[in-house]
Amino acid sequence: MLSNPWKSGQDRVGLFDASLRPLLWERLIYYIRILVIFSTMYWIAGSIIYGAVYKRSDMTHHATLEVVDLDGGPVGRAVADSILQLNSRPSDKSPRWRLRTDLPTLAATREWVRLHGWGAIVINQGASQRLQDAAAGYSPQNAVTVINNTGRHPVTSISYLEPALTQAATAAVHQFALAHLAQLQAPADPLLLPTLALRPIAFTSEDVGPFSFALAPIICVFGFLVGTLMMVEALIEWKMTTFLLFRRAKHWHVWAAVAVVITSWALFVAMHSALAVSAFLGPGYTALALPYTVGRFFSLWFTTAAVLAAIGVWLFNWYLVLAPEFFGLPTLITVISNVASLMTPLELAPHFFRWFQVQPFYNGSMLFRYVLSGAYPKVGLNVGILLGEWALMVAVLFATSWIRQATILLGIADVAGWLHGGIFFHSDIPYYKDTKAALSQPARFPRRFAVADAPGDTMSLREGNLGV
């Protein structure tokens, strides 16, 4: 009666049995290698993340805020000069100020900041005249408008640029109040005297960001990140399950099939991202954003698909030529560097990180925001970068798929991608060097040998005795 080997425990020994020592030692050496690889991965990923945000507050001087004098009178000149004087005291933690004369109205300034800028301080038209003709109902807040754009990058805007706008406007208003007090004349309405003496002008603040703070930080990066992780799972599975395809099919057929499958999978995953935006826009999708239409749904769908397709083909190129132990390295670097491109405005990051502007996440996020709000209109550049990266990676795929097929047919790599000679390698295809060595040896036969098919029956092929 056959026994159950699992229950009987036959042929199994303790973990520290002498027969297992070579295996344990071999595995220990391998896992030490893995620790070195993982440590390298951590430091690369950490350097990218921390480097992208390193000294972010000390690089605020790379941002430019606008000063718009629509008044043209004493109030406008005094406030504008007070703010522009801040440039004479440069600091890495302070933005630069620029006087704009090409924005004719407050509405035009709002629109420019919404589409392109970080923020602006506007001295409103007629501020000097209203102060001079102060009468009952005079409102100092109508003199200056502070325009902020938290939708461009909410963390940076709220942490650094919005305080800079408020501080500059407050200082300019106070400075004007002190100068105005020295030449103050009694108004027609005595009740206005305290107001004109203490606060002749003031400012109001408004935010023209097309997204609220609750939506802006996550609407792009979260959707792209989830989609990329879904791509990674499928790509690794395809690497493990296409062994027979690479073994038997023509190379260019395999190349075309892989490119089509990855792009199709990116379209499928991206569809869910676009549907999620449709379902969860909520109150964070402000009135400044554009109406969400069917056309914008498809624009978001294809934008996300372009991002995921470019990243998918890029990663699969690495997976095809790397052993499984190295899969994490290109995956982590790709994901972390793309996320880092959205963590901080690249204009405020160290100069090394400016090349992150070619990252798929960055260009996808700019297109995402343009589709939803009309802001940051660089469609041609962003689309060109994404499609160019996808096309380049498909061209590289031609080479990496050829390498994968060659290593399979030569017995260099197995199903998972482990290389010949490794402790995990297993393939039924003979190693090409062993095959070559065997074929190079000449066939040798003994000069005399006997074949016996029965006791006492021998014959010699050399002597021609075949037993007949």
Image (spheres, rainbow, N blue to C red):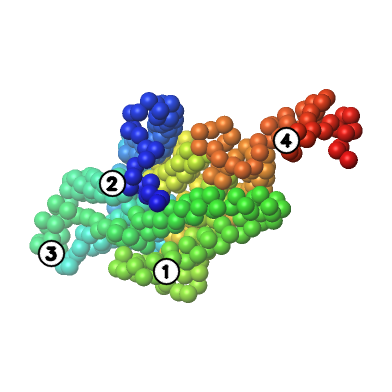
Tell me what residue is drawn at x 12 percent, y 64 percent: 189
**Rendered location of residue 245, percent (x, y):** 63, 54
Q: CA distance from mark 4 to mark 3?
A: 140 Å
* Residue type marked 3: Asp
- The residue carrying mark 4 is 455
Q: CA distance from mark 3 to mark 1?
A: 60 Å
Q: Is residue 265 above or below residue 184?
A: below
Q: Residues within 10 Å of mark 4 (few under 14, many from 20)?
A: few
Q: Nearer the viewer, mark 4 or mark 1?
A: 4
> Residue drawn 42% across and 72% down?
292
Whichever of callouts 3 and 1 sits on the residue coming sooner in the sequence is 3
Q: Are marks 3 and 2 in contact (CB under 8 Å)?
A: no
Q: Counting residues from the N terminus, which is met first, the one under dot 4 or under dot 1?
A: 1
Disc ID at residue 275: 1
Cα separation, mark 2 vs mark 1, equals 32 Å
Question: Furthest residue to the front?
Answer: 456
The numbered disc on residue 189 is: 3
Q: In the image, residue 397 lies at what x, y percent?
A: 63, 48
Q: Could you tell me residue 16's position as x and y percent?
A: 33, 28
Give the mark, 2 or 1, whose residue is nearer the N terminus. Answer: 2
- Circle 2 is placed at which residue position? 159
